[in-house]
Image: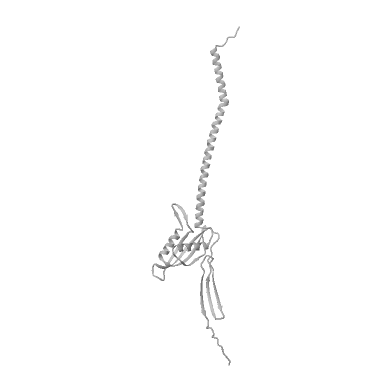
Amino acid sequence: MSKRKLPQSAQIAIAIAALLLIALIGYFALVKPQKSKAASLSTEIAAQDKQIIEARALLAKAKNAQKVRVADLFRLTKAMPDQPDEAGIILELTNVARQSGITFESIAPQASTLLGGYQVVPITVIFDGNFFQLTDFLFRLRNLVDVRRGALAADGRLFTVDSVQFDQGELKFPEVKATLTVDAYIYGTGATVSAPPQTQAQTTTGISGTTTSATTTTTTPSATTTTSTTTTPSAAAAPSSTGATN
């Protein structure tokens, strides 16, 4: 008895079905896992790209912030140094006064006062001259440190005027005599400014019988030194006589 052959169409259908089955098996066994891996890698790459972009943005922001912070720190240090520098304080006051046409009779720094995280150095200055020059001096002093367009501008040290006292000068107005108390500032509580010591000395000259009394105010190298001397003759010099013997 011979076996019956399948029709050709059935053979073709079976072959196609087998091929489809192989293709499906290959797809699920090989292709689909790789596609999943590829999709996962794409997600990771996108996440890494996002992190890189964010890191670059933060870096650029940090660089810009650092520039601003350094510039602000420089201006703040110029306006409020962390060192007393009495010579610099007096020199800056003298320069502003010279620009205003003013000459001070005296400049006397006082002992500093601690206020929180900074110090205040009072400086007493005496001026005898034109009222309008004094007004110009105060204007220039106030504008050494200012806020312009929302940013700190420091062209010198920070000063504030604590008090101003006017007296009539030798001439009529606008000539005046003014005593000002100006405050300078020091950042931190480290080195302090001490009041200048006062010394009194008395010298007697025996030959002429003259007594000299001097009161000397000595300040730091930057301050003004004032000396007042009083001379009182104690006795007239004895006349000399010469006798000749013939």
User: For this rendering, which residue is in front, 22 or 76?
Assistant: 76
- Classify 30 as above or below 119: above
Q: How is the image coloured?
A: one colour
Q: Residue at x 55, y 31 (%)?
A: 38
Q: Identify which residue is drawn at 51% across, 79% down.
A: 232
Is 119 or 141 nearer to us in this picture? 141
- Number of marks in picture: 0
Q: Residue at x 54, y 35 (%)?
A: 45
To which quarter of the image does residue 161 belong? bottom left
| Residue at the outermost bottom position | 246
* 194 and 144: which is toward the camera: 144
Q: Residue furthest front?
A: 246
Point out the image quarter for the C terminus.
bottom right
Q: Position of residue 49 (x, y in %)?
A: 53, 37
Query: Along the horizontal axis of the image, is 143 left or right of 27?
Result: left
Say which residue appears at 54% left-offset and 79% top-offset.
210
User: Where does residue 149 sit, x and y in percent of width and height?
Assistant: 43, 52
Residue 183: x, y in percent? 48, 62
